[in-house]
Image: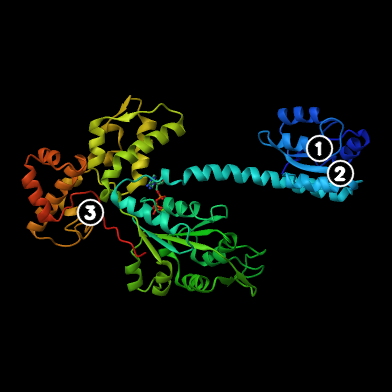
Amino acid sequence: MEHPRVLVVDDDASVRESLRMVLKGRAHVTAVADGTAALKELTNGSFHVALLDLVMPGMDGLELLERGQALDDPPQFIMLTATKTVKTAVRAMKLGAFDYITKPFDVDELQVVVDRAAESGAMQRELETLRTEVGQRYDFANVIGSSQAMQKVLKIVKRVAPLRSTVLLTGESGTGKEVIARAIHYNSPRRDQPLVALNCAAIPQNLLEAELFGHERGAFTDAHARKIGHFERAHGGTIFLDEIGDMPPSTQATLLRILERGEFTRVGGEEVIEVDVRVVAATNRDLDKSMEDGSFRSDLYFRLNVVALPLPPLRERREDLPLLIRHFLEKKSREAGLPLRNFTQAALDRMLAYRWPGNVRELENAIERALALSDRDALDIDDLPTKVVAAPDLAASPLTLPVGNEGTSAGSQAHSMSDQVDALERQLIVTALHRADYNQTRAAEDLGTTRRILKYKMDKLGIDETPGSESQFSSGA
Ligand SMILES: Nc1ncnc2c1ncn2[C@@H]1O[C@H](COP(=O)(O)OP(=O)(O)OP(=O)(O)O)[C@@H](O)[C@H]1O
Ligand SMILES: [Mg+2]
């Protein structure tokens, strides 16, 4: 940290001078003789630390402390006191002063206290900025999703966030696993403690263990110094283990031991370290398959899967699209300092009909791109990525559609013609319903049929009258 700016307030000129001397070369010192001058300085300049004499003619140290603290961005206050006024100094501490020093002061003590005050102030400011930023970012209001499937997810998130339970988030790429992991942490009692995220797929397998648990000096060739691992850094808070399906078996075994015992040793070390860490894990792999082929330990799976939170792909909660589009239009325009624009109806229809294999992330990128590249007043179809424009409608590609309630089979199995017809019909109806806000009369009109026939088909195909039925959502909670 650069030299802190320190304000000295004392009516005694010799005290001001000696403080200047003592702090020379370690702080930028401004010195004034009374409370009024001090308040003026505090209002104008930003100080990191203020040293206040308690007993001064006019405004005394306590009053100055109270008024100073009411200012925007106040410094850390240190009270200077003669031994006989120590009681008052203690009162000052209760009022929020950082510390007090008795006169005549000890040079080393004074320097240490000033340094600590400056550091503590810097940390507080940093924390506050982070907290506001983060708090806004991971407030539930910013997790968009009014579909039944997302409402179900959010309900579970709210219920489990305050607990210590391990959560396993699954879902395709871009479905919002990280968003939810953060929402869990920032809505838990651990929100002021660290959230440490580690992407298990991004770190070479042979280094992962040391990243997670740290290592002692000399544990392996490149271990020149002791290193604190992610688990230790997350103490009191949450660790987000992203892409857990990519964790090698040896590391899985170590992780399992931590989850069972709450303790571990650093690589190459003996000392047993206890940690209190909540684990939130995520993967877009099919862990059932990984367990079958032996690449993922089932005992670890059951430890992690205490609360299972599968995130539905965007194509299964298409009713969230309008809200998400609006959200990203607003957010991206604001971030880029651009005026708010909308999509044309044609572009919106195209977006509603597209499959979004990259889920929310793909949508977000498409919107950001359109805003950046187009100078039209209303963004149109050809402002969208070619992929989105050229892809067949979700409703017109039966071979890649879900059949029945079994989720997406992506054409991997041979289906009979009637299965395919059913799938196509089902998708047409669901899409029409979504567009009509589940108003069956309007959906029927849109499909060129009657409400009675629509209702008959819905019953036959098992389509619910309210949104969310086609989601695969289920919870192991
Ligand atoms: N419900 C949501 N509301 C608002 N934004 C969302 C939502 N879901 C996802 N996003 C946004 O979409 C992007 C992708 O989300 P996120 O990184 O959480 O996905 P992921 O599931 O972790 O993907 P991957 O498996 O590829 O890592 C992010 O920019 C995120 O802000
Ligand atoms: Mg992710």
Whole-percent x and y of residue 12?
Answer: 91, 34
User: What residue would you read off at disc 3?
Assistant: 469
Q: Which mark is residue 140?
A: none
In this rendering, is residue 268 above or below 342?
Answer: below
Contact, mark 1 vs mark 2 (Cβ under 8 Å) = yes
Q: Is residue 407 above or below residue 19?
A: below
Position of 154 with respect to 219 (left or right) is: left
Q: Which residue is mark 1?
A: 61
Percent x, y of residue 230:
56, 61
Instruction: Work out how far the residue at label 1 is from the one at label 2, CA to CA, in angstroms.
Output: 9 Å
Mark drawn on residue 81: 2
Label 3 to label 2: alpha-carbon separation = 71 Å
Picture coordinates of residue 207 (x, y %)? Answer: 54, 64
**Front disc: 3 or 1:** 1
Real-space Cα separation, disc 3 to disc 1, in angstroms? 67 Å
Q: Residue at x 19, y 55 (%)?
A: 402
